[in-house]
Image: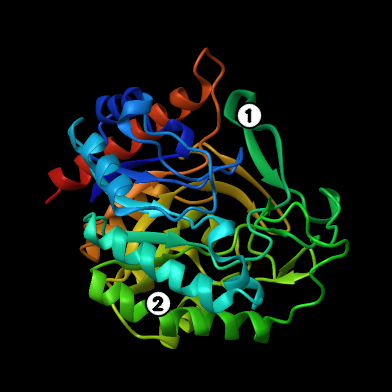
Amino acid sequence: MKLGLGLYSHMLTQDNFRFARQAGATHIVAHLTDYFGSSSRLPTATSGGWGVSDNRENLWTYEELRDLRAAINAEGLELAALENFDPSHWYDVLLDGPRKKEQMENVKTMIRSIGKAGIPVMGYNFSIAGVWGHVQGPYARGGAESVGFMGPDGPEETPIPNGMVWNMVYDANAPAGTIGHITHEQLWDRLTDFLEEVVPVAEEAGVRLAAHPDDPPMPTIRGTPRLVYQPKYYQKLMDIKPSQSNGMEFCIGSLAEMTEGDIYDVIDKYSQTGKIGYIHFRNVRGKVPHYEEVFVDEGDVDMIRAMRILKKNNYDGVLIPDHTPQMTCDAPWHAGMAFALGYMKAVITMLKSEG
């Protein structure tokens, strides 16, 4: 097993690459989508870093991806994966809108560039509402700031307005109104169209598409359906287009939040498939509709037991800490990640010593 760190677009800097290496990581999972601002591209190295640029609609280019990988390699790390397309790249693929064909071709173009740049995995979440409804609070040990989901006691599930998917506005000038009612069957049909079109391109490019389970894993959010909100739906997704390029971004936290299945059986089953792109290593307390994200060593999941199962099934991919609680210090995010990485590295070392 390999230890990695996920970095948001504004964190793709030399200092954070060095932090990852110093904390024991060997791999990076990079988010190019700017969830917190207005763009999702990488500037050239001459602009002073590898953060975001100014135009979200521009496709990620081979040259940008090559340069990002080179910057990561220069710090002794490997670029294991990219995570999440920008909504501006594929909103009509999700909504079955008028630009669907054009945007499907754009996704294929980016997959080819990702493969050419030598990046093996593209994580994605086929969801309209995206990650929604989390609230912040002192949920982790010692009052550390983390996030939770409160179901009916949380934010009101308002309809999604036109011009928005994944909580991000792709068209500020969209007409008034909402995106309307969508059924589970319609969303599965849209996913099927996506996989039928894109998986063959991913196969040719040497890229594995890795689907994230729904977070939070509710049947519906904001009046829109979810796909992988129970573990069994991962199998349904993979059966649509059987291929080594049709895989999973395996989130232990999201899977533990689901109301069906034993988490250890789920890890055992899917880690035998050879189709996990990489793993989000996160612990939680509770299940939907009410759960809290906590430190990796204090939740409902015995994470050492989880890693033993992965070892038994010869999982040799990347694990990254995910949504780690923020610690009370001058660098809350970095401290939380350093704690998680240290814990994970210690367990990996222990399991290796056991033979």
Please state the horizontal and vertical placement of residue 232, each as a whole percent of the image: 51, 78
Q: Residues within 10 Å of mark 1 (few under 14, many from 20)?
A: some
The quadrant in which residue 136 appears is: top right
**For the residue marked with disc 1, what is the amino acid?**
Glu
Furthest residue to the top?
A: 330
Cβ atoms at labels 2 and 1 below 8 Å apart: no
Q: Earlier in the sequence, mark 2 or mark 1?
A: 1
Query: Closest to the observer: 342 or 278?
Result: 278
Find residue 212 and name its label: none
Q: Judging from the image, what secondary structure is the residue with disc 1 in?
A: strand
Q: Is residue 203 left or right of residue 292?
A: left
Q: Which residue is mark 2?
A: 198
Q: Is residue 19 above or below residue 115?
A: above
Find residue 145 and name its label: 1
- Residue at the (31%, 48%) spot, across then down: 65
Please state the horizontal and vertical placement of residue 344, each as a whole percent of the image: 33, 39
Please state the horizontal and vertical placement of residue 73, each as a whole percent of the image: 19, 38
Residue 265 appears in the figure: no
- Residue at the (25%, 35%) spot, across then down: 71
Q: Is residue 46 left or right of residue 257?
A: left
Image depth: mark 2 or mark 1 in front: 2
Report the number of numbered marks. 2
Gap between marks 2 and 1 measured at Cα? 39 Å
Please state the horizontal and vertical placement of residue 317, each as a whole percent of the image: 25, 56
Residue 296 appears in the figure: yes
**For the residue marked with disc 2, what is the amino acid?**
Val
The quadrant in which residue 250 appears is: bottom left
Q: Judging from the image, what secondary structure is the residue with disc 2 in?
A: helix
Query: Closest to the observer: 79 or 205?
Result: 205
Q: Is residue 151 left or right of residue 306?
A: right
Q: Residues within 10 Å of mark 2 (few under 14, many from 20)?
A: many
Query: Closest to the observer: 146 or 350?
Result: 146
